[in-house]
Image: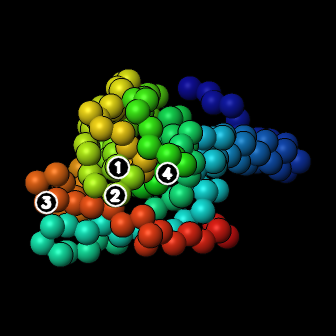
């Protein structure tokens, strides 16, 4: 059985083959692991925190990315979308449904009214589309990976209330 005869190649051919192989591996890794535009948009948002107060007095501090009402996790790479907590606020209460689509992981969407009262937590399956539209107008939205709010103890049953005045925002460096 004969192979390509690498052992018979001159040192120059071996160096050229090694450089070509290394370059191919580098280009492939850059293409596979480089954040896409949607992921970079989320990673470039300012970081911050906000608190939620439960009816029993428990305060929960959330580390967040502060977006705008149009911010979304659509198209964001799963390794980032599966960890991101995206906060946004409208300048006034909204009655239009918050449509979630093209997200690569399952997420929960919490909608809060103008006073911070939790209206609804929508579960949105990966790669699906769902309109989250509570019966009342909402002003604040938090998008997080599926199960996030349950882990944190945020629920209608717990009387969870967003404290918008606790929002702290720092530019991402």
Q: CA distance from mark 1 to mark 4?
A: 12 Å
Q: Are marks 1 and 2 in contact (CB under 8 Å)?
A: yes
Q: Which residue is mark 4?
A: 88
Disc 3 secondary structure class: loop
Observer-side mark, 2 or 3, equals: 2
Q: Does the rendering let one see residue 131? A: yes
- Give the percent coordinates (x, y) of residue 128: 36, 24
Q: How many marks?
A: 4
Instruction: Name the residue rendered at 19%, 67% in the picture.
Output: 54
23 above or below 98?
below
- Among numbered discs 4 and 3, the one appearing first in the sequence: 4
Sooner in the amino-acid sequence: mark 2 or mark 3: 2
Q: Residues within 10 Å of mark 1 (few under 14, many from 20)?
A: many
Front-lying residue, 144 or 155: 155
The residue where tag 2 is placed is 116
Asked if 12 appears above or below 75 in the picture, the reply is below
Tell which tag, 1 or 4, sits nearer the viewer: 1
Q: Position of residue 65 (x, y in %)?
A: 51, 59
Residue, disc 1: 113
Secondary element type, mark 4: strand
Say which of 131 and 138 sits in front.
Answer: 138
Kindly report the distance in space between the C-alpha atoms of the residues bearing marks 1 and 2.
Answer: 5 Å
| Residue 156 percent across, percent down from the top left | 16, 51
Residue receiving disc 3 = 158
């Amino acid at each position: 059985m004969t192979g390509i005869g690498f052992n018979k190649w001159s040192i120059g051919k071996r160096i050229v083959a090694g450089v070509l192989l290394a370059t191919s591996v580098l280009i492939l890794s850059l293409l596979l692991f480089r954040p896409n535009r949607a992921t970079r948009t989320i990673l470039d948002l300012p970081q911050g925190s906000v608190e939620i107060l439960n009816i029993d007095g428990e305060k929960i501090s959330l580390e967040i990315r502060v977006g705008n009402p149009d911010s979304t996790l659509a198209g964001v790479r799963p390794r980032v979308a599966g960890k991101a907590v995206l906060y946004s606020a409208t300048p006034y209460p909204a009655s239009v449904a918050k449509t979630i689509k093209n997200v690569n992981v399952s997420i929960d969407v919490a909608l809060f009214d103008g006073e911070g009262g939790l209206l609804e937590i929508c579960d949105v399956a990966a790669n699906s589309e769902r309109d989250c539209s509570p019966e009342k107008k909402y002003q604040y939205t938090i998008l997080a990976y599926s199960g996030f709010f349950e882990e944190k103890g945020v629920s209608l049953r717990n009387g969870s209330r967003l404290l918008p005045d606790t929002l702290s925002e720092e530019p991402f460096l």
